[in-house]
Image (tube, rainbow, N blue to C red):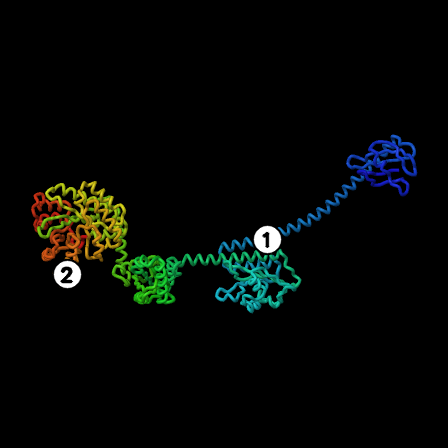
Amino acid sequence: MAALLQHGEVLASVGFPSGQEPGEALLGLPEGEEGTLDVPGIGACWTLSLPLGTDYPLRIVIASPGERLDRGETDLLRGMGRVLALGLRSLELLTNERTLRERSEDQATENARLLEALRRRQVLLERLSRLQRAIVDRLPIHEILQAAVEGACEFVGGDVAALRRRDADEPSHATLVASVGSSAGELAAHRREPADAGLGGRAMRERQLAVSDAVTGPRASDLSADFGAGNVATAMAVPIYEKGQVAGSLAVGSHESSRDFSARDQQVLSAFAEHASLALDHARAVEEAIHEAFHDSLTGMPNRALFRDRLEQALTRAEHTGGSVGVLVCDLDGFQTFNDSLGPETGDRLLQAVGERLGACLRPSDTVARLGGDEFAVLLESLREPEDAARAARRILDALEAPFELAGREVFVSVSIGMTAGADTADTLLRDADLAMYRAKKQGRGRYTMYEPEMHTAIVERLELEVDLKRAIEREELLLAYQPIFNLRSQSVVGLEALVRWRHPTRGLVKPDRFVPLAEESGQIIALGRWVLRTAAHQAALWRARYPGFPSLQVAVNISGAQLAEDGLRAEVAEALELSQLDPGGLVLEITETILMDDIDAAVKRLGDLKDLGVDLAIDDFGSGYSSLTSLRRFPLNSLKIERHFVAGIGSDDEEPALLRAIVDLAEIFDLDPVAEGIERRDQGERLLELGCELGQGNLLSKPLSAGDADALLLKAGLMQGEDARSGSAADEGTEEAASDVRVADDEVG
């Protein structure tokens, strides 16, 4: 009898009586041991337990009712066990090999499937990447949308595909803008349909992907609104967006009624729809950026860049036709005052309203642009004659005559217009029209002026003069002339007014009315005023030290509006007094009336600070501005200088003499010393004395003198001994000759 055991279980047995299994005693026999086993029905048997090898947990148990096996039989038995183990090993290897082969085949099939899926995904990603590059490269939007439709149809595996876009002007309808698989005739019949029609309309309403099959519908005939084709059996559609709003739909269809669109197909369609939406958003952003780059954000009108571009195009057309182009530059008069008084928001509404009127009064072919601020420009094409530009300017002035209703009030606005016409470059025409506009503004409000070549010559000379003025101080080209101020009754000199002059190395003596306004506009007036103040203070200190017999001698210096607005003016005056060792009473600061009226509270504060230094203060050119009596009383003034226009009116029949009398009386009321400017005739001096004005200056008494000639005048007047000076002494022949190099006409003094 024999049994094959594994882990205490019988795998096979032979020789045991029918119906009997090896007993537990047989199973429990240890490996490699002999023993005796009582087998039912047979009796006591000799037994042997042998392992079959180390690779398998198998052993064989032999039982015999006869004698025990000898050594040879035992070895044979052991060999048989090894053969059995080798056989089992071979069977196991064959089984494993078969399993591995089956697994390898399954893996190869899976790998092939994965490789195909990866290939399709890679192709899909490449197609989507090309779409993205097309969007970034700003290809035409219809090309990008067509590529999206073709890609969706290819990768979903559909027969037809279409993209419909909602009409901007009529959102209730949608137009087919890209398609694949439909004939031209079918597309023509269904190119424009109601936006809510078909499967795409459903996707747009529900704002999600919609699928149509034999169960869900709609009918195949209804899908023609999506594809322009009547034989579509199944389809799916997804909405596309623009700026977050539903802008259309992308749909893919199949002719097979059994076609089932998988989740992957739906994902692919959604991916192409997202790229179509991205393309629409990017196109709209580019369009808005271009519009913003070439249009004014406030008025929506073309800006300077677009105006210049259209001007260049018009010049190109004019070159081919032999015509000319007109350019008008319009600047609102007094807009800054309006903006400051009513606020910037109302100012913006005024600019918008002006732009609307300008566009309404000109031809549709003309271009109206806002160049910036309160400046507009007009492009007139196909000019027959320069007078056409003048007629357009006249229409603009007429259009702005009616008041504007703003902030609950009526507002009147005028413009100054500069015009030019020709076929020159765009930059030249704009420059010339701008120069003409400034000429019109100087001539008065609500005017138009045609460009003349002399205007450009003047501006070039002005720019050159501005550059030279920057170096004039360091090159010591500036000098001061001094015009004496006389006591009209005693004919004695009581002071002198310092007047700046510029001796240009090539232009000669430059008049103050040319370079002083230039210094104010360019910001150089601060440095120029500082130099005048220090130089005049130094000269005043020398004269007061040289003529101790006349300790009340004063030198007057003009202070500009820019200087008065500077926080450091008081420190500058104090420094000039300290450096020159001048007693503050020897310095008079003259401020023009109009400057004081710009900001009365600030002027009162600044004048008070200057008055604390001990200097005298005078209001210059009184009568040329609009001082109120209340304001005049607040200023800590010492004297009042009467504008020369009132002095010139003495002897005439108009109202000027009466105004002059009022000014002198006003000075007396406010305890101010009146000083008359521009005395040219003897009767003027006599009349001023009659009115009570005892101080004056002008060419009749003395023209502006150099520092040396002024010193000679003081010496000749006998100030050291306190003698009275005579009127003729100021016009003495010798003195006249000595001062001829710096004297200028009285209209150049200021």
Whether 178 is drawn above or below 568: the answer is below
Q: For the N terminus, which image quadrant?
A: top right
Residue 462 place in picture, x, y as percent: 26, 53
Which residue has dot 2 on it?
A: 658
Q: Earlier in the sequence, mark 2 or mark 1?
A: 1
**Do the CB atoms of the residues marked 2 and 1 lie less than 8 Å apart?**
no
Q: Which mark is residue 333?
A: none
**Label 2 crowd (10 A; few <14 / some 14-19 / many >=20):** few
Whether 730 is drawn above or below 579: the answer is below
Residue 227 place in picture, x, y as percent: 58, 65
- Spatial CA span between label 2 and label 1: 98 Å
Which amino acid is tagged 1? Val
Secondary element at tag 2: helix
- Name the residue nearer the viewer: 84 or 350: 350
- Judge whether residue 388 can be spotted in this image: no
Q: Residue at 7% of width from left, 46% of height from top?
A: 723
- Name the residue nearer the viewer: 258 or 149: 258
Residue 721 place in picture, x, y as percent: 7, 43
Which residue has dot 1 on it?
A: 123
Which amino acid is tagged 2? Ala
Secondary element at tag 1: helix
Whether 562 is drawn above or below 407: the answer is above
Q: Going by the image, does 380 lie left or right of 236? A: left
Residue 268 place in picture, x, y as percent: 59, 56
- Name the residue nearer the viewer: 4 or 278: 4
What is the count of numbered marks? Answer: 2
Mark 2 vs mark 1: give the one in front: 2
Residue farthest to the top, as pictured: 71
**Label 1 crowd (10 A; few <14 / some 14-19 / many >=20):** few
| Residue 413 quadrant | bottom left
Q: Going by the image, does 229 lie left or right of 2? A: left
Residue farthest to the bottom, as pictured: 189
